[in-house]
Structures are given as structure tokens and as C-alpha cells.
Image: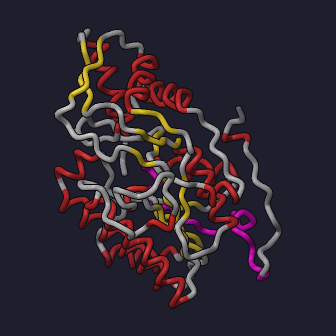
Amino acid sequence: MPTHSALQLEVPKAANNGTPSFLADKSAKVFLAGHKGMLGSAIHRRLAALGFTNIVGRTRAELDLTCEPAVQKFFDAEQPRYVILAAGKVGGLHASSAAPADFMTENLRITLNVLTAARRCGTVRKLLFLATSAVYPVDAPQPIPESTLLTGPPAPGNEWYAIPKIVGIKMCQAYRAELGMDAIVATPNNLYGPRDPFPSESSHVIPALIRRFHDAKASGAPEVVVWGSGLQLREFTHADDAADAVVLLMETYSGPEHVNVGSGREVTVRELAETVREVVGYEGRVVWDTSRPDGVMRRLLDSSKMAALGWEPKVELRDGLKKLYEWYLHGRAPDFEA
């Protein structure tokens, strides 16, 4: 299996209009919002490996993306040529349901502020906005094509995170239609990888399972309780694979429709939990709390458009889980900073 550090993309000399393509413009300033997050850090690693020399990132302490004047001042000063918006308030279903106002307002502000400042700046040649598969209707056909957006409401509990992302998709389309701005959108599904936050109640399913099984192993607990029936089908994509997709889209894609990014490989949550249990080395029982909600029973993306561009995920789930657990054991989880 090829490693991501070994992957190479062919670099064209210039775009058809005479301006350099993204991969031929490696000295240009790239503002990567959310560069310390799970996906943002994977994108940063990928760009650095490809030879980009002017990647600009700011921590939350350095730049509050929810503050419009601060964001505008930053764009006026830095004048980036490319923008990748991977920042946002993230968490699992429990976290968004427990703090719907925070998820809605913070993500809306980040989306509006960054996209508006990029439009006003005048130097941005291309912008990529990261959405989420949660934007799709709860009863969408499977696999889910991009065309199902806004054909129904998102799943209950997901709307607080999904609606700001839908706004971002539509803003990119509006800026393209009215102003000719090259704003594109990637819609990934259930990402995991290093820097995925591990707080037990606010994390996504994979880091939550890793932490629960690890803590149970360390304490000698006889069982681990997992929410739901475990019958839900989920598609997981490693952050390194998603980062490759982002680079490929920045290089080759320019269109109004968002593009799905999913591995195409499904597992039940029970199968996932068993794999995590084996990776961690926990030997106790797994108890399924069926009084807890399952969430959406299936969410598989139709990523044929992404595949047609030449993207293919490389990281197998078990391999990705092993690497993530190794990262967790090295004590790097507390360093997470969005």
C-alpha cells in the first residue's frame, strides 16, 4: 500500500488561461483556516510534502474567526491567493445536541466571515470550503448523490451543524454565479485521524470508542457500554485520504456543485467497535445500550465524481485505527486545538 508521503501528483506548467495551476504555484500564499485541526493538519502536511512554502495558519488565540473585523483585518494584511476553510466547531451528535446554539452560531459566523473577507480581499484566486455529509436529508437515497442536497431536512440533531455548512455551499455558489469567484466545496463523510479530539462526551464515534476501550483496559473494567444498537452502517475516510482529495480538487475542479468525498467502504458500528476493541487489546464485554439513539441508520456517499477526477482512498480502516491509537498512546490528544 503506497504511503501518502510517497504520493506524487503531476504538475502542469500552467492553467489554460495562462495563470499557474495550484500545484504549479507553490510559492503563493495559502491561508489554511483550521490548520491545527484533524483535517486541517492533514492538509497542511500534504501541502508541505508537495513543496508549498507559504502556508499561513492561525490558532484560535491568534485569530478569532467568529469576529468579523479581525478576519477582515487579517485578509487585508495577508492577501492570500488561495483559501482552504477547514475550521469550525466540531463534535459528535451528543455534543451538537447539547449545545445547538453554540454549534449553529459559531459555525455560521466562521463561514460568513471567512467567505465574505475572501470575496472582499481581491487577491483570492481560488477558495475551497469544507462541508459535511450531515447536510443531506435523513431519508436520502443510498449512496447519496450531490443532487439530493435540500430535497429534505437533515437528520434530527444534525441540523445545528449541517445548516451552517449548507449556507457555506450556497454562498460559494452565489459568489461564483454573481461575481465569478472560483469557490468550490468538498463534502467529506465521517473523517478520522490524528488530532481527532478525544473528550468522551463531545467526540466522534471512533475517538470515543478508542478512549472508552483504552480506559476500560487500563482500569480492568469488565465491560464497555456503547450507545445504540450498533446496527448503523457508517462510511469512514481517513484524514490523509481527504487531504489528498482537497489538493486534487484545488488543482483540477472548478464548478458550482459540491463534491462528495467518501471511501465507499461501509461497516456497522458493531464491526467498528469490535475492530477498535481488538486494536486496543481490551478483552472485556461490549454492552449495547439500545435506549440511546442510533442516529441515521445509513449514510454512504456517492463519490463517483471524486473518483472520476482520479482520487482513490489508500488507508484501510484497521490500519488507520492502529495508527490513531498509537498517536493517542503517545499523549498527543491533549494537544488538540481547533
Is 288 rendered above or below residue 33?
above
Is 64 rendered above or below residue 214?
below
- Coordinates of residue 37 in the picture (x, y in percent): 42, 49
Q: Nearer the viewer, residue 307 or 7?
A: 307
Q: Which of 73 and 158 is in front in this view?
A: 158
Picture quarter containing residue 164?
bottom left
Picture quarter containing residue 304?
bottom right
Horizontal arrangement in the rendering, residue 131 relative to residue 107 (left or right): right
Q: Which of 150 and 4 is in front in this view?
A: 150
The residue that appears at 73% across and 40% down in the rendered structure is 6
The secondary structure that dominates the magenta segment is loop
- Coordinates of residue 326 in the picture (x, y in percent): 48, 25
Task: Examine the structure image and report whether residue 35 is included in the region drawn in magenta.
Answer: yes
Horizontal arrangement in the rendering, residue 213 relative to residue 16 (left or right): left
Picture quarter containing residue 265?
top right
The residue that appears at 49% across and 29% down in the rendered structure is 321
> Which residue lies most toward the bottom here?
178
Is 168 rendered above or below residue 6?
below
The residue that appears at 27% across and 64% down in the rendered structure is 106
Q: Which of 144 and 52 is in front in this view?
A: 144
The residue that appears at 33% across and 52% down in the rendered structure is 90
- The quarter in which the N terminus is drawn is top right
Asked if residue 31 can be seen in this view, the reply is no
State the colouring used for the structure image: secondary structure
Task: Examine the structure image and report whether residue 278 is included in the region drawn in magenta.
Answer: no
Asked if residue 105 can be seen in this view, the reply is yes
**Number of numbered discs:** 0
- Coordinates of residue 218 in the picture (x, y in percent): 30, 13
Magenta-tinted stretch = 17-37
- Coordinates of residue 85 in the picture (x, y in percent): 47, 64
> Which residue lies most toward the right here?
13
Is 146 rendered above or below residue 116?
above
